[in-house]
Amino acid sequence: MLIGEKKIERPFRWGIVGGGRTSGVGYKHRLGAMRDNTSFVLKAAAFDLDFQRCVDFGKNLCMDEDRLYPDYKAMFEAEAKREDGIEAVDIATPNFQHFEVCKAALEAGLHVICEKPLFFEIEQGEEIKRISEKTGKIVCVTYGFSGFDLLTQMRHMILSGDIGEVTMVDLRYAHGFGCDPTGDTQAEGQKWRVDPKKSGPSFVLGDLSTHTFYISELVCPQLKLKQVLCDRQSFIRSRAPLEDNAYVLMRYESGAVGRMWASAVNAGDMSSQHIRIVGTKASLEWNDMHPDELHYEVQGKPAQTLVRAMDYLSDDALEYERLGALHYTGLIDSWSNLYNRFAVAMDAKNRGDEQTRRNLVYPDLEHGIKGIRWVTKCVESADKGGVWVDFE
Ligand code: NAD
């Protein structure tokens, strides 16, 4: 059980780029990172393109005004000169800025936590990998749904053979919040998402399905994706060439198959991710509207619902359990668990403790690059008319 006590000697001094007052995701980062005050403490920020709004916001968060910066370059430069300067930075800007800020952060000697989709191109991921190896600083990715305890349980049961050999991977991140085309011209957070220069080569494949793809990799680490076939549509025509709906078929090296439905125009659907892993003996199913329940269905037996925090779960699924049974968790619990692991990973890297880092399950740079590959290959398949393309 985790009740907020420190896992590392002291919390990292932490900064953030983006994530300001009007941002969609900023508060989730702060809630996740500082839940316990033993992993990260926010010391500096370049919150916003609008510097006055950055200052107003930072002051309202009781931050020191002299550590609120007009941009990330000024922040990295000034913080590097301080004895108590930041040691890690979070990148919560729109997608097109992830690469340049990440590069500058690593070169400034900072560990990085970066939003998804990580970058636009696989080559950018490889370049960041080289810089990360050279500077000895790590990159973590906020696949924010992946810290739920029952996903750890799902991984444990699949690796323990509780469902037999995996045959089918059924994934869905398909909501209806993009049905209104006026949102594309009015809402700041939506405008850039449908602009290829700012969003990258895709809309829902990158914005939504990279999360679910990572979860499939988390719970089925033994599977190796071989090929994808994608068909994508822009049901709101003005979004073309970016898709607001996509279907992807997958083939794995083992012979298992899969499918992903990613959509922002699944009208009326308020829920988001569903993950069903089917094996030769049984299936496991989880969805993020009910994250404290994992459905285990053995062929020919009554279905079971496993509940978070119960002592029949695996030790690793209980390690990050914070509330006890009978009380329910939410998205921020998942983010907090991830940020806790990010801090332990950064600390292990600083101490040269590779074993601790290797044993820690969290979305790292490799998973971020896999996410870029996922988007790249799906787009390539769709743009060739919906053909099978090799994943690697
Ligand atoms: P948004 O448009 O709502 O907010 C972006 C914020 O960044 C704004 O405050 C803006 O002023 C600021 N900003 C932009 N450029 C900046 C710069 N150069 N320096 C400083 N601040 C800058 O976008 P959002 O919805 O918050 O998304 C931001 C990122 O987070 C995207 O990459 C998105 O894919 C990701 N995201 C992830 C999740 C998740 O669950 N992990 C959820 C939502 C968004």
Image (cartoon, rainbow, N blue to C red):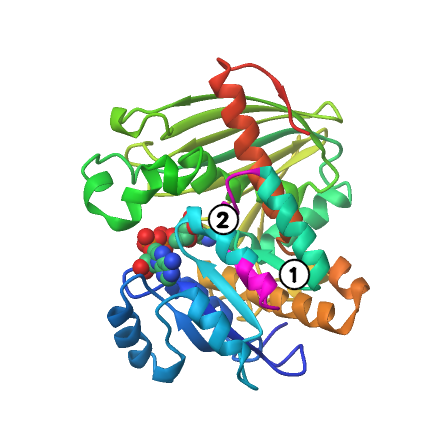
Query: Which amino acid does the dot numbered 1 rest on?
Result: Ile
Residue at 76% x, 59% y: name it: 359
Camera-side residue of 171 and 352: 352
Name the image quarter holding residue 370.
top right
Q: Look at label 2 and name its amino acid.
A: Lys
Decide if residue 313 is in sight here: no
Instruction: Give coordinates of residue 77: x percent, y percent.
Output: 49, 73
Q: Mark 2 points at which residue?
A: 116
Query: Residue 326: x and y, percent?
Result: 50, 66
Whether disc 2's CB lies below 8 Å from ligand 1 is answered: yes
Residue 68 is situated, as x and y percent measured from the top left of the image, at 37, 76
Quarter of the view holding residue 377: top right
Residue depicted at x 63% and y 65% = 341
* Image: 120 above or below 346: above
Q: Which mark is residue 130?
A: none
Residue 26: percent from the left, percent from the top? 38, 62
> Separation of disc 2 and disc 1 at Cα?
16 Å
Q: Nearer the viewer, mark 2 or mark 1?
A: 1
**Residue at point 26% right, 34% down?**
179
Residue 22, picture quadrant: bottom left
Secondary structure of the residue carrying tag 1 is loop
Drawn side of residue 57 relative to residue 362, left or right = left
- The quadrant of the picture occupied by the N terminus is bottom right
Query: 203 or 278: which is nearer to us?
Result: 203
| Residue interval drawn in magenta | 104-121
Q: Which of marks 2 and 1 is nearer the N terminus?
A: 2
Left or right: 67 with respect to 148? left
User: Which residue matches tag 1?
Assistant: 138
Image quadrant occupied by the C terminus: top right
- From the Cβ of disc 1, is ligand 1 less than 8 Å away? no
Label 2 residue SS: loop
Q: Quadrant of ligand 1?
A: bottom left
